[in-house]
Image (cartoon, coloured by chain):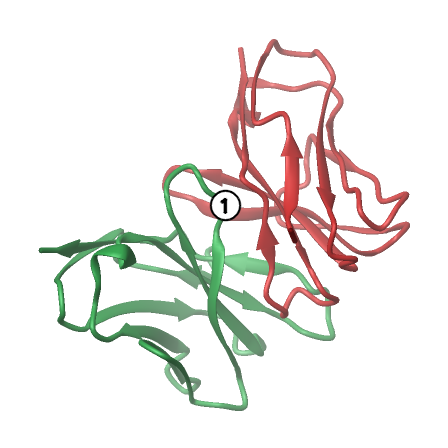
Chain colours: A red, B green
């Protein structure tokens, strides 16, 4: 089954404790992206990747890192999480460019205390 | 500065009638637009898209209209069904530039029985 998976689905952590949210897709997609969804703000792009070893900042990259060492995986790293990073995070992938239909993962709800 | 605006946070429509969701944008350089639908506790799913060289795209019950001079697009759902109750996001892309995707804040559509 074609899908985008994210782990964990739910996470409660404390300020400053490094964490990684994994994202994996099995569709051989080149384009992958991370978004956060906040009440009243919709979906905002954090980082995206056009291909392996190619990553670019989205609209809200501060406080986040990503890597794209393999085509299928695009982890989101929070080196020192802060409470303002409490949010719902979505990973997405598409065939090549972002203009193609993106497939979204189920979301990761992160709470930073 | 919000580049993609969905000014109606929510909309209620009678089942069987037409639902019209609106989206305005500020950057005339956007050249591709997409609509996504999101149910609670799920990731967004792609609905329909339109290139800036077109003014209409239709897919079953869903039609997207683009008015470039007004920098406005709308999604029409006819006839509206109970399963259409969801949050709808419009998104815009600058192709051949930075490939960022800008989403609106979303509109919650309620289909009334």
Report x, y in % for residue A68: 85, 44
Image point (60%, 19%), residue name? A82
* Direction from residue A107 to residue B79 in the image, left or right: left
Residue indicated by mark 1: B43
Residue B104 image-quadrant placement: bottom left
* Direction from residue B52 to residue B90 in the image, left or right: left
For the residue pair A30 and B72, the one nearer the viewer reads as A30
Q: In the picture shown, does residue A43 fall above or below B11?
A: above
Q: Mark 1 falls within which chain?
A: B
For the residue pair A51 and B96, the one nearer the viewer reads as A51
Other residues around mark 1 within 10 Å, as few (<14) / some (14–19) / many (≥20): many
Report x, y in % for residue B81: 21, 63
Q: In the picture shown, does residue A69 fall above or below B61?
A: above
Image point (76%, 59%), residue name? A29
* Direction from residue B21 to residue B69 in the image, left or right: right
Q: How many marks?
A: 1
The residue positioned farthest toward the front in the image shown:
A1
Image point (62%, 43%), residue name? A60
Q: Which quarter of the image is occupied by the C terminus of chain B? A: bottom left
* Direction from residue A73 to residue B33 in the image, left or right: left
Secondary structure of the residue carrying numbered label 1: loop
Report x, y in % for residue B69: 41, 87
Report x, y in % for residue B75: 33, 72
Residue B55 image-quadrant placement: bottom left
Residue B5 image-quadrant placement: bottom left
């Amino acid at each position: 089954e074609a899908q985008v998976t994210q782990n964990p689905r739910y996470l409660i952590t404390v300020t400053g404790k490094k964490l990684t949210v994994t994202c994996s897709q099995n569709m051989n997609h080149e384009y992958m992206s991370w978004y956060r969804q906040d009440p009243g703000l919709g979906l905002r792009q954090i980082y995206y990747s056009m291909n392996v070893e190619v990553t670019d900042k989205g609209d809200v990259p501060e406080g986040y890192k990503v890597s794209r060492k393999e085509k299928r995986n695009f982890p989101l790293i929070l080196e020192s999480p802060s409470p303002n990073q409490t949010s719902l995070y979505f990973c997405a992938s598409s065939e090549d460019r972002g203009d193609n239909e993106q497939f979204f993962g189920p979301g990761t709800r992160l709470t930073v205390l | 500065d919000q580049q993609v605006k969905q000014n109606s946070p929510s909309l209620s429509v009678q089942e069987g009638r037409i639902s019209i969701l609106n989206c305005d944008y500020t950057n005339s350089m956007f050249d591709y637009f997409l609509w996504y639908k999101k149910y609670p506790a799920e990731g967004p799913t792609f609905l329909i898209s339109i290139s800036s060289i077109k003014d209409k795209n239709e897919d079953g019950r869903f039609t997207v209209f683009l008015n470039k001079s007004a920098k406005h697009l709308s999604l029409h759902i006819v006839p509206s069904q109970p399963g259409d109750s969801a949050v709808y996001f419009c998104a815009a892309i600058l192709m051949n530039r930075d490939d960022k995707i800008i989403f609106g804040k979303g509109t919650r559509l309620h289909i009334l029985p």
